[in-house]
Amino acid sequence: MDYEKIERSAKAQARGIKMITYTGLAIWGLLVLFPFYWMILTSLKGYGAYNSEYIPQLYTLSPTLQNYVQAFTAVPLAKFFVNTLVFTVITTAIMLVVTVLSAYAFARLNFKGKDLVFTLFLALMMIPNELVVITNYVTVTNLEMRNTFAGLILPSVASVFYIYLLKENFAQVPNELYYAAKVDGTTDFKYLLRVMVPICKPTLVTITILKVIECWNSYVWPRLVTDEESHFLVSNGIQAIRETGFGRENIPAMMAAVVAISLPLIVLFLLFRNKIMEGVSRGGTKG
């Protein structure tokens, strides 16, 4: 009988701990999601209704899409989307080529001084980003590539972190596969494309998604090398709207523009969140 009481007590304690845990997570989730809710809610309020609220309301009885229409007509927001899409696709594609080839060289090829080169390569992560931005800005300016897509793209096509992540993933592939492929006369390039890339696909998907998010949210570098509206990205476009457009006086339209810009990344993350977690865990696990 005593054992049954102890068991019931343990189960009740476990249920209590689980309830407290889920309650805490639910509260934390609401706190995290509330800014997004407020952003969407504000974008659906009319300009007059928003300004007439002495106390902010947590709901609206007359939602409107007029703010979204104004966000795309008052400023060339669609042009900013196209610029960002071009920048993101080209940068990500070049980055994948550079990352895959570099990671494969460090993981599988044997050459003199490989460990030293890789150590020095990792040491680049210790350099403050501000110093890199300054040197890149001077280089791009000297090459007269300001206000060009080349100036936007080239400094972003290599990442030490992504190379390291993929190199560690490549190193987990058994060496026996490589030796068997070499016996069959397979070249390193064919082995990379037919064996390594398919096996490490989750990490590659993760790197791709993270790079897309990084490019889409890029602000400092595009702000430095572009001062013409024709080359603005969405992040710089939002800043331009806030400074010189309708953003300071028409907050609902400003929020509509932010929602429109944020929506692609939110959808992308929700669709591939499992791939991101799988790729990061595989890339960071040895053996």
Image (cartoon, rainbow, N blue to C red):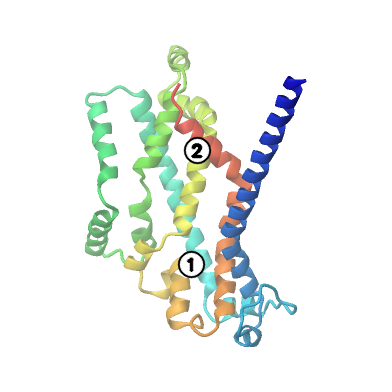
Q: SS class of the residue under badge 1?
A: helix
Q: Looking at the picture, how far across and down is residue 267, in whole percent?
A: 62, 54
Give the number of callouts.
2
Q: Local crowd at mark 1 within 10 Å, few (<14), some, or many (≥20)?
A: many
Between 249 and 71, the one nearer to me in the picture: 249
Q: Local crowd at mark 2 within 10 Å, few (<14), some, or many (≥20)?
A: many
Q: Looking at the picture, how far across and down is residue 69, in whole percent?
A: 63, 78
Task: Mark yes or no: residue 147 visible.
Answer: no
**Which disc is residue 204 wearing?**
2
Q: SS class of the residue under badge 2?
A: helix
Task: Name the residue: 42% across, 41% down.
Answer: 97
Between 230 and 217, the one nearer to me in the picture: 217
Quarter of the image that includes the N terminus: top right
Task: Name the residue: 52% across, 47% down.
Answer: 209
Disc 1/disc 2 C-alpha distance (Å):
26 Å
Earlier sequence position, callout 1 versus callout 2: 2
Task: Name the residue: 64% across, 52% down.
Answer: 26
Q: Quadrant of residue 36?
A: bottom right
Please tell me whether residue 122 is drawn above or below residue 62 in the rendered image: above
Residue at the farthest front position: 2
Q: Which residue is mark 1?
A: 234
| Contact (Cβ within 8 Å) of mark 1 with mark 2 | no
Q: Amino acid at mark 1?
A: Val
Left/right of residue 24 with respect to residue 109 in the rendered view: right
